[in-house]
Structure formats: C-alpha cells, structure tokens
Amino acid sequence: MVEYGRSRRDNHQEEEPTPRPKVKIGKAWAEDLCTVKDCYDGFVSREIKGYSVLFGCPVCDRFKTNTFPNTAIPTLKRWMGRYGTYTDEEMARRKEDRLSVVESIREQARRKIQFDNIDESLSGL
C-alpha cells in the first residue's frame, strides 16, 4: 500500500556527502607561459571583415588540450599572420607574478587549515 505525503527519501538512510576534489595549483601553471602577447590559453582572436575569428596560437599547443574552463578545439586553424612576443625580461616578470599568486593561494590554504584546527579544539569545550 502506498502512503501518500511521504517522500522516498524518508525510507533511505542519510548518505555521506561526497568529498570535494582537491585542486592542486603548482609551479607547472606558473611556468606554462606562452611568449605570444595575444595568446589567451592557446587561442588568438583576430578581427576579419568586421567579425571576430578564433585561431589557435602559432607557438603553443594549448588549444589542443582540455584545460578548465576552456575546451580543446583540435581542428582549429593556426594563426599564420604576424604576432608580437614578450621579451625575456617580460617573461621573467610574468613568471614571478604567477609564482606570487601560487604562494598567496598556498598561504590562504595554510591559514584556513590553522583556523579549522582552532575551531575543532574549541568545540570540545
């Protein structure tokens, strides 16, 4: 016999929530820099006859790999025209900026871990 007004969830035990995946941000992201100034995650956008057209970067192959939030487009044509590149000094500065971002994210994670440990120790009082 069917009981009206009760959901199916009432019959099941409460399930454990699935753990969130840990995101690792390492030096690989900080060191994976393209030398082309117009390259954004492996893509180069150019205006042709009033329309914005997307091309693959002429130097790197990142447009062929899936990296969140960008989806790979392996059949994309490469840009064959002129492009500007960063100098060695600019590349070193960009790499230092990215490494500082990685360190700040790691520092925030350390602070959160310490804060969580304090909350656990206070909950026993």
Image (tube, grey):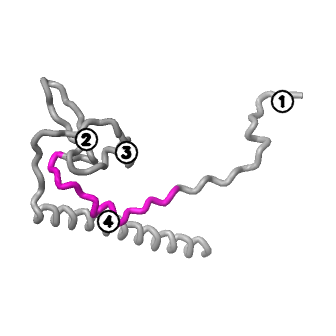
Question: If you read the primary sequence from the N terminus, does the residue marked by circle 2 or circle 4 appear first?
Answer: 2
Quarter of the image that includes the C terminus: bottom right
Secondary structure under tag 2 reads: strand
Above or below 81: residue 87: below
Range shown magenta: 21-38
In the image, residue 17 lies at what x, y percent?
A: 62, 53
- State left or right for residue 103 relative to residue 110: left
Could you say which quadrant of the image residue 90 lies in? Answer: bottom left
Mark 2–mark 4 Cα distance, whole angstroms, equals: 27 Å
Do the CB atoms of the residues marked 3 and 2 lie less than 8 Å apart?
no
Question: If you read the primary sequence from the N terminus, does the residue marked by circle 1 or circle 4 appear first?
Answer: 1
Task: Name the front one of labels 1 and 4.
Answer: 4
Mark 3–mark 2 Cα distance, whole angstroms, equals: 16 Å
The residue sitting at the top extreme is 49
Of the pair 64 and 110, the residue shown nearer to us: 64
Secondary structure under tag 4 reads: helix
Q: Which residue is mark 3?
A: 69
Q: Which mark is residue 56?
A: 2
Instruction: Please tell me which residue is depicted at 35% across the width and 40% down the height of the picture.
Output: 74
Quarter of the image that includes the N terminus: top right
Q: Amino acid at mark 4?
A: Val
Task: Name the front one of labels 2 and 1.
Answer: 2
Task: Name the front one of labels 3 and 2.
Answer: 2
Question: If you read the primary sequence from the N terminus, does the residue marked by circle 3 or circle 1 appear first?
Answer: 1
- State left or right for residue 84 relative to residue 23: left
